Amino acid sequence: MLRPLALVTALAISLGLACGGGDGDETATIVVIGGEGEGVELTVELARTAGERSRGLMFREELAEDGGMLFVYVEDTEAGFWMKDTLIPLSIAFIAADGTILGVQDMEPLSEELHRPPEPYRYALEVNQGWFREHGLGRGDRVKIPDSVSGATAGE
């Protein structure tokens, strides 16, 4: 029989994992496609729950060159982003539900400046700062997102 403290601890861990309290290790491969039709693959961590989206890439010291984080929302949003506890310089693309990039902005580490989208968006993609520029990608280009990455976790 479990002791009361052990039972409470086990329940707390189970609830944390069920509510997205893990390390956000779910990933997907997306392709960013430029006007010439050439695509660049990225392996992105998925931020689907409110907790995962709130935590984002905070406190990380590095991000893989071909990596990033895709923030996924159930419906269009106009939520802004800041870098208060984020240690690495990032670029963010706000992406419509159909995969069209609506705008790209650079964000500085530890800044509390709010970065807002040019219009409502369904996804936001954070990558190392300058990634879009280095690949000649930006507004009007497209992101191919797998069908399995359709929306945030229900209830979030």
Image (cartoon, rainbow, N blue to C red):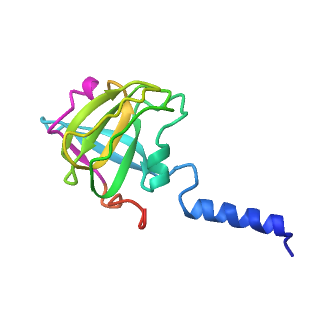
Residue drawn at point x = 49 percent, y = 52 percent: 51
Residue 139 in the magenta stretch? The answer is: yes
Residue 80 is situated, as x and y percent measured from the top left of the image, at 33, 41
Percent position of residue 155, x then y: 42, 67
Residue at 48% from the left image edge and 50% from the top image edge = 52
The residue stretch that appears in magenta? 131-145
Residue ranking furthest to the bottom: 1
Residue 20 on image: x %, y %: 53, 58
Residue 37 in picture, x, y percent from top left: 15, 39
Q: Quadrant of the N terminus?
A: bottom right
As rendered, which of 55 and 130 lies closer to the eye? 55
User: What residue lies at 57% left-to-right and 55% top-to-bottom?
Assistant: 21
Q: Quadrant of the C terminus?
A: bottom left
Res 150 quadrant in image: bottom left
Residue at image location 41% in from the left, 38% down from the top = 68
Apparent side of residue 56 relative to residue 116 in the rendered image (left or right): right
Toward which corner of the image does residue 36 lie, by quadrant?
top left
Residue 93 occupies quadrant: top left
